[in-house]
Image: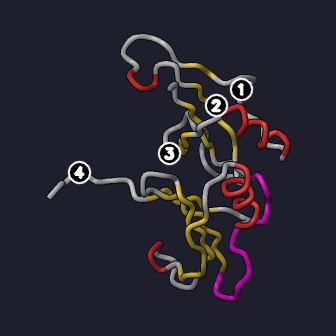
């Protein structure tokens, strides 16, 4: 038995599940595997219900989008779009999700048409000794509709 943990999925809480699906499914091209409703007990929130969507992130891994609602069915988010309480990616507790893409320029074009722009003017190209598979990779960070930091990476072939 292998004792090393494996990544099954990354979960992201969103204010508007449909807006997040447009970003991840429609613009990034991640296939929707399943969606539905569930109770929030696993997160220690007994009276909350949530709507979820599981997206294929490749290699058997998934991105789970969650929109929590209270027991009455209304949204339990702040309702303030873009008012993320997450710390910046450079601060402890901050973070990002990295997604490999086959054509970074194509994805950035689709995102720009929908109003999503990278955090840098141009993608960064990694180069130098000791980088392994990262040598020649092009990457850029972009914010999703809820201001989660998403790194898009195109590896050199």
The reply to whether the C-beta atoms of the residues labelled 1 and 2 are less than 8 Å apart is yes
Query: Can you name the residue that lies furthest to the bottom here?
Result: 72
User: Which residue corresponds to the image point at 52% horizontal and 25% vertical from the top-left?
Assistant: 156
The percent position of residue 141, horizontal first and vertical second, equals: 64, 35
Over which residues does the magenta segment extend?
70-82
User: Which residue corresponds to the image point at 85% horizontal and 42% vertical from the top-left?
Assistant: 113
Say how the picture is coloured: secondary structure
Q: Is residue 141 magenta?
A: no
Rendered view: 83 above or below 155: below
Label 3: few (<14), some or many (≥20) within 10 Å? Answer: few
Residue wearing tag 4: 4
Is 5 left or right of 150, judged from the image as shown? Answer: left
Residue wearing tag 2: 140
Query: Can you name the residue that lies furthest to the front here?
Result: 157
* Mark 1 / mark 2, whichever is N-terminal: 1
Depth check, front residue: 146 or 121: 121
Depth check, front residue: 79 or 50: 50
Rendered view: 133 above or below 98: above
Q: What is the number of callouts on the image?
A: 4
Nearer the observer: mark 3 or 4; the answer is 4
Q: For the residues marked 1 and 4, what is the alpha-carbon distance in whole angstroms?
A: 35 Å
Instruction: Residue 95: give its label.
Output: none
Residue wearing tag 3: 93
Q: Is residue 73 magenta?
A: yes
Q: Residue 111, located in which quarter of the rendered image?
A: top right
**Predominant secondary structure in magenta?**
loop
User: Which residue corresponds to the image point at 71% horizontal and 64% vertical from the top-left?
Assistant: 15
């Amino acid at each position: 038995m292998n004792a090393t943990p494996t990544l099954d999925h990354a979960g992201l809480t969103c204010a508007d599940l449909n807006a997040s699906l447009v970003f991840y499914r429609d613009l990034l091209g991640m296939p929707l595997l399943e969606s539905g409703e569930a109770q929030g007990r696993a997160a220690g929130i007994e009276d909350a219900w949530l709507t979820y969507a599981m997206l294929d992130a490749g290699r058997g891994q998934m991105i789970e989008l969650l929109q929590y609602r209270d027991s009455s069915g209304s949204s339990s988010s702040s309702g303030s779009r873009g008012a993320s309480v997450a710390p910046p990616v450079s601060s402890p507790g901050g973070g990002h999700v990295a997604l490999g893409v086959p054509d970074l320029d194509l994805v950035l074009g689709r995102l720009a048409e929908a109003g999503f722009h990278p955090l840098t003017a141009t993608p960064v190209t990694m180069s130098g000794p000791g980088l392994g598979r990262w040598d020649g990779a092009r990457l850029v960070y972009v914010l999703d509709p809820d201001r989660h930091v998403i790194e898009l990476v195109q590896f050199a072939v």
